[in-house]
Amino acid sequence: MVNLIWLFLLMSGIFFAAVNGRIEVVTFAALNAAENAVQISFELIGIMALWLGIMKLAEEAGIVKIIALLVRPITGYLFPSVPRDHPAMGAIVLNLSANMLGLGNAATPFGLKAMGELQKLNPKKDEASEAMCTFLALNTSCITLIPATIVGIRTASGSIDPTAVVGTTLFATCCSTAAAVIADKIFRSCWERKRG
Amino acid sequence: MVEIFIHEISKWAVPMLFFIIPGIAFLKGIKVYEAFVAGAQEGFNTAIKIIPFLVGMLVAIGVFRASGALDVFTKLLHPITDFFDIPGEVLPLALMRPLSGGAALGAAAELIKTHGPDSYIGFLASTMQGSTDTTFYVLTVYFGSVGIVKYRYSAAVGLIADIVSFLASVFICRTVFF
């Protein structure tokens, strides 16, 4: 599916650029995006190092274990294929907590750490495991308790009530996360049946 | 009141984590600096590993964005949004949301500025922007970091969540603010 989406974005982009008579933007946009990708990765190095360093401290101090223990009923239900005391659980919990609090730059390092741990459990190294699919379903739909960025923008544009959207955002994010979890469960059982 | 609360949490969360975690680790007798550096070393490889995946995805999205294809798809979807009485102004934001976090934030900020933060469209754009994450960025970076190319059904799940988030935003904003 991702192959088709990728091809669709690229082909329709080139097609409409040609139709709109500005085919030259394709080259510029492509080179620009390639450069931007490297820049994002490089910026990520520092952020990754910082948060993984802090996480190592939290791990060794036993903080991660305590947090993972507290939410075990939920994570146990969502990730039945991950052993209860596996380090992946700690990273997953930290990632989801960072997302909820709107700490975007901490969420990615924890999330990638979780993916690394989940990959150790994955029998097929080039294909997503069930646990990874569930984890990314939670991540792309992202439960947000504090939409800090958008509240900031609203304040800056002179809103009389910048936080009026906190409740509506919470409602929408809960709906989308619920939909993601349900869709993940349905797709998973279809996938298993297909495999036999 | 809530605004101050959110502002304070955003301001204090990271410093407090940097204070509490090393503090507890120290009290537990851990060599804090050494442990920090040991953890930090993992960051480099992971970040470098995602470059080819990110280049591939961002180039496709970049070309799509620059071509004006978005306008065409917006026009195609207009009859549907009109039918459900959804303001068409938010369509580019809805289409951009799963593809590019930066572009979506830009579109949301623009809508908030043009229509006013406390208008129906302003509320709707804010809710849409805050209630979901950039699906393709997350998939690319997360799967890329461990070298996975077969996403199974992950893209479908992410897009379903995006559509639900959009419809839920419209529903709740219409109920509360309209």
Image (cartoon, coloured by chain):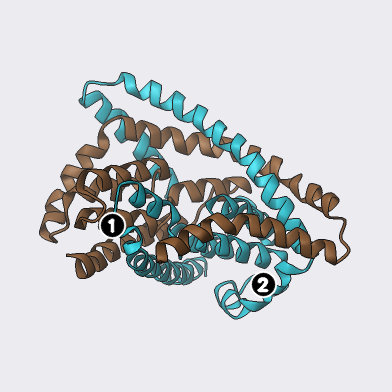
Chain colours: A cyan, B brown
Name which residue type carries label 2: Ala
Quarter of the image where one finds residue B82: bottom left
Q: Is residue B54 left or right of residue B174?
A: right
Q: CA distance from mark 2 to mark 1?
A: 40 Å
Screen quadrant of the C terminus of chain B: bottom left
Compared with B73, A128 (above or below) is below
> Callout 2: helix, strand or loop?
helix
User: Which residue appears at 59% of the width and 74% of the height?
Assistant: A75
Q: In the current view of this chain or complex, which residue is farthest to the top?
A: A24
Residue receiving disc 2: A68
User: Which residue appears at 51% of the width and 46% of the height?
Assistant: B140
Please name whichever residue, B72 or A191, is drawn nearer the observer in this view of the structure. Answer: B72
Chain letter of disc 2 in the image? A
Name which residue type carries label 1: Ile
Please name whichever residue, A147 or B171, is drawn nearer the observer in this view of the structure. Answer: A147
User: Which residue appears at 21% of the width and 25% of the height?
Assistant: A20
Residue B13 percent across, percent down from the top left: 59, 59
Contact between marks 2 and 1 (CB within 8 A): the answer is: no
Residue A192 percent across, percent down from the top left: 51, 69
- What is the number of callouts on the image? 2
Mark 2 vs mark 1: which is more N-terminal? 2
Q: Is residue B3 left or right of residue B112?
A: right
Can I make out residue A119 in this image? no
Residue A160: assigned label: 1
Please name whichever residue, A72 or B110, is drawn nearer the observer in this view of the structure. Answer: B110
Label 2 crowding class (10 Å Cα cut-off): few <14, some 14-19, many 20+? many
Residue B89 percent across, percent down from the top left: 19, 47
